[in-house]
Amino acid sequence: MNLFEQFFESILQAKTVLKKDHPQKDILRGYCFREFLIVIRQDLQHPHAAGWVQINFAEQDAARVQQELQRALEQSPVFKLEEAERNKIVRFKLKPDVKRGNRKAIRLEVFGPEGFMVGFNQYQEAGDRTPESPASR
């Protein structure tokens, strides 16, 4: 659970909204990130990796998001860890030309612990009206 706590609290700077420990049963952590509630459960009776979890957001400037998250990393205790340990908590990958459905995007992938990933897609099509674009508000 410690890796997820570092990822959400130090890197994503998500608000912690739930901390419940049930001894010898499970540990729950809930985070509010971009108005989404994300709950992580660690099963202490039958331990297993989280598996593959992906959450995607449309974003106007994926490079800016990367800079903000990189700055948060550099200011966190995670940054002082050896690279191998740091990579268990967070890794960034900016892809300049990714096909997402029928559209092209600049995509920032933020990899967290145990297969957890947050993707930020900056769509490239002219006239694109994603829910977060100023033109659609």
Image (cartoon, rainbow, N blue to C red):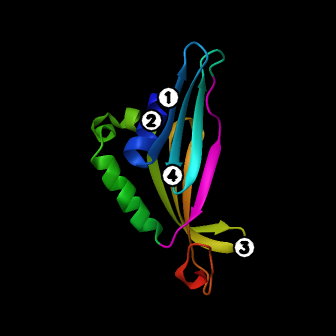
Circle 1 — which element? loop
Circle 2 — which element? helix
Segment tinted magenta in the rendering:
48-60
Kind of residue indicated by mark 2: Glu
Image disc number at residue 37? none
Q: Is residue 73 above or below residue 121?
A: above
| Distance (Cα) linking label 2 and label 4 | 13 Å
Q: Closest to the observer: 132 or 49?
A: 132
| Distance (Cα) linking label 2 and label 3 | 35 Å
Sequence-wise, which precedes: disc 3 or disc 4?
A: 4
The image shows residue 14 at horizontal and vertical percentages of 45, 48
Disc number lying in front (3 or 4): 4
Residue at (60, 58) in percent of width and height: 56
| Distance (Cα) linking label 3 and label 1 | 37 Å
Residue at (38, 37) in percent of width and height: 86
Q: Decide: marks 2, 3 in contact (CB < 8 A)?
A: no
Sequence-wise, which precedes: disc 1 or disc 4?
A: 1
Q: Is residue 88 visible?
A: no
**What residue is disc 1 on?**
1
**What residue is disc 4 on?**
33
Kind of residue indicated by mark 1: Met
Image disc number at residue 5? 2
Q: Decide: marks 1, 2 in contact (CB < 8 A)?
A: yes
Sequence-wise, which precedes: disc 2 or disc 4?
A: 2
Residue at (33, 51) in percent of width and height: 72
| Distance (Cα) linking label 1 and label 4 | 17 Å
The image shows residue 132 at horizontal and vertical percentages of 56, 72
Q: Is residue 112 above or below residue 105?
A: above
